[in-house]
Image: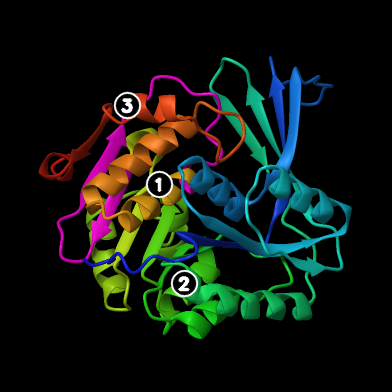
């Protein structure tokens, strides 16, 4: 497998998420369904998978540009939050209000509940502007990440359309983190990297079958024929399974005994892995770095935030497993 490090560029990663959101985090001592719940603490910030990934890239010392679509008062809040966090961005303005999503965290109980708004309608003009903007920036980073759900009015081939427009850009690897028809069509268009959780993998490629490593290996072989170089399937506490061209599959896992919230760990994994590869790390080292970064993210409330002390703590607690896990 080759995800070669290219020349120095303006950004390490272009993070594209058409379905941005205001993310609200509520810390609760308990959660009673059908009753009134009072939060111990509430936080509101810019969110959506692309913004969460961009925040993680910044936390890990990388250079990122966040691209997406926002609108209304909520969209203005998102832009102000990105500016406050010093996250470079170039958002497309739409007519309708950007969505809101909520994360409920039970303090000290290691339980996270996420309520996602599917999003509001986005006019075709805004969607077209975002594609042109991506084309304008495509030469300025080695990795383009298309991530998250699509707003309900955008067609399932939207990510595939982006891939078709930029896939011939030299020194650009296209990475996707989504599911369902949007992912299938992006694969057909020719992406190099997929990062999904195992439920998204099953729903998209194995018709909802229970997890089966042999089936995953067969699926990767099929995806390779379409141009895929790297498939990452995250499985929470079981780590992440890595399938790469020209290499035997392996699993990377970090020993984590406690966490605050599980929301956003996959986005941080993607950020860490691509930054590691861009810095010249081997795939094994890059995925170890990514796994430790995701573990550090678990200790924070807001998606994409982590500190160096936690990262340093979890790196030695991260390991690679090869033949042994294949025999289980």
* SS category of the residue bearing label 1: helix
Residue 67, image quadrant: bottom right
Residue 220, image quadrant: bottom left
> Which residue position holds label 1?
272
Which residues fall within the magenta stretch? 240-267
In the image: residue 281, left or right of residue 267 = left
Q: Measuring from the top left, give residue 47's x and y in whole percent.
A: 67, 47
- For the residues labelled 1 and 2, say whether their Cβ atoms are less than 8 Å apart: no
Q: Measuring from the top left, give residue 212's x and y in whole percent.
A: 28, 51
Query: Residue 25, relative to residue 219: is it above or below?
Result: above
State whether residue 157 appears in this view.
no
* SS category of the residue bearing label 2: helix
Mark 1 crowdedness (10 Å alpha carbons): few <14, some 14-19, many ≥20: many
Identify the residue shown where x is 76% and y is 80%.
Answer: 124
* Alpha carbon separation for disc pair 3 and 1: 17 Å
Q: How is the image coloured?
A: rainbow
Q: Is residue 259 magenta?
A: yes
> Which residue position holds label 3?
255
Q: Measuring from the top left, give residue 287's x and y in whole percent.
A: 30, 46
In the image: residue 155, left or right of residue 184 = right
Mark 1 or 2: the one toward you: 1
> Which residue position holds label 2?
184
Q: Measuring from the top left, give residue 15's x and y in whole percent.
A: 55, 60
């Amino acid at each position: 497998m080759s995800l070669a490090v290219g020349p120095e560029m303006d950004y390490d990663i272009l993070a594209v998420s058409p379905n941005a959101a205001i993310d609200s985090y509520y810390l609760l001592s308990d959660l009673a369904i059908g009753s009134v719940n009072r939060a111990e603490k509430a936080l509101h910030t810019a969110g959506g998978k692309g913004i969460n990934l961009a925040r993680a890239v910044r936390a890990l010392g990388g250079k990122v540009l966040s691209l997406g679509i926002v609108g209304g008062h909520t969209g203005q809040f998102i832009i102000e939050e990105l500016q406050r966090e010093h996250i470079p961005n170039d958002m497309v303005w739409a007519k309708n209000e950007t969505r809101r999503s909520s994360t409920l965290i039970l303090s000290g109980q290691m339980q996270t509940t996420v309520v996602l708004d599917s999003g509001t309608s986005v006019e075709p003009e805004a969607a077209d502007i975002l594609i042109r903007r991506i084309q304008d920036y495509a030469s300025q980073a080695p990795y383009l990440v298309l991530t998250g759900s699509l707003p309900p009015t955008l067609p399932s081939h939207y990510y595939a359309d982006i891939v078709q427009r930029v896939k011939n850009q030299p020194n650009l690897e296209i990475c996707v983190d989504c599911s369902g028809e949007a992912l299938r069509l992006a694969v057909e268009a020719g992406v190099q990297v997929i990062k999904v959780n195992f439920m998204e993998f099953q729903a998209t490629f194995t018709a909802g079958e229970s997890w089966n490593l042999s089936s995953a290996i067969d699926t990767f072989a099929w995806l390779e024929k379409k141009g895929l170089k790297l498939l990452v399937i995250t499985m929470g506490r079981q780590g992440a399974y890595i399938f790469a061209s020209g290499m035997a599959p392996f699993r990377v896992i970090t020993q984590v005994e406690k966490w605050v919230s599980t929301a956003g760990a996959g986005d941080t994994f993607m950020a860490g892995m691509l930054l590691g590869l861009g810095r010249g790390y081997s795939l094994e080292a890059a995925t170890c770095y990514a796994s430790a970064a995701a573990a550090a993210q678990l200790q924070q409330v807001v998606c994409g935030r982590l500190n160096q002390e936690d990262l340093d703590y979890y790196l030695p607690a991260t390991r690679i497993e090869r033949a042994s896990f294949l025999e289980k």
